[in-house]
Image: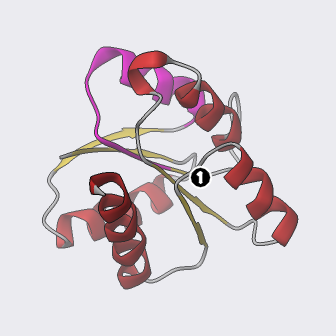
Amino acid sequence: MKFLVVDDSPTMRRIVVNALQTFGYDQIVEAQDGAEALEKLKAEPVNFVITDWNMPNMNGLELTKAIRGNGPTSGLPVLMVTTRGLKQDIIEALQAKVNNYVVKPFTPQVLKEKIDLIMQSMAA
């Protein structure tokens, strides 16, 4: 299982990558914004996207819409990890078809639970 971790903060990418490695996932690609993430998606197959919302160039919402609108990537699981916790933000993210949503700060356990929930729903 290969993850794409997208965040403009190197520290936040490191936190997510370290958590994924703790869960036993070792195939991880990183991108610093949505535009770079789309390039990486074109270059290599990825099974799961974890993205921040607020990023320069292309934000996580735009990235999610681009993933959903592209045939080969339209079914990719997308987990949004963001500081935006307002109900309206969550609704907007869900309308863009993110699979789930985590508000920062979060614990590795919460991240794992959300990933597991998405995996279970994809398998169903």
What is the image's colouring? secondary structure
Q: In this view, does 6 lie above or below 113?
A: above
Q: What element carries label 1?
A: loop
Q: Residue at x 59, y 22 (%)?
A: 69
Check residue 35 for magenta coloring.
yes
Q: Nearer the viewer, residue 16 or 46?
A: 46
Q: Which residue is drawn at 34% across and 52% down?
A: 122
Q: Nearer the viewer, residue 63 or 28?
A: 63
Task: Name the side, left or right, on which 24 lies relative to 15.
Answer: left
**Image location of residue 100, percent across then percent down:** 54, 61
Q: In this view, does 56 lie above or below 83?
A: above
Q: Is residue 107 above or below residue 15?
A: below
- Mark 1, Cα crowd under 10 Å, few <14 / some 14-19 / many 20+, is many
Quarter of the figure with residue 55: top right
Residue bounds of the magenta highlight: 33-50
Task: Name the side, left or right, on which 42 lies relative to 106.
Answer: left
**Image location of residue 101, percent across then percent down:** 58, 64
Name the residue at the right extreme.
88
Check residue 56 for magenta coloring.
no
Task: Name the side, left or right, on which 52 lies relative to 4.
Answer: right
Q: Which residue is drawn at 61% across and 33% down?
A: 63
Q: Which amino acid, mark 1? A: Asp
How many numbered dots are placed on residues in this image? 1
**Image location of residue 2, percent across then percent down:** 22, 43
Task: Name the side, left or right, on which 79 lies relative to 56.
Answer: left
Q: In this view, does 18 lie above or below 73?
A: below
Q: Which of 73 and 40 is in front in this view?
A: 73
Q: Residue at x 37, y 60 (%)?
A: 121
User: Residue at label 1?
Assistant: 52
**Image location of residue 109, percent across then percent down:** 36, 84
| Quarter of the figure that contains the C terminus | bottom left
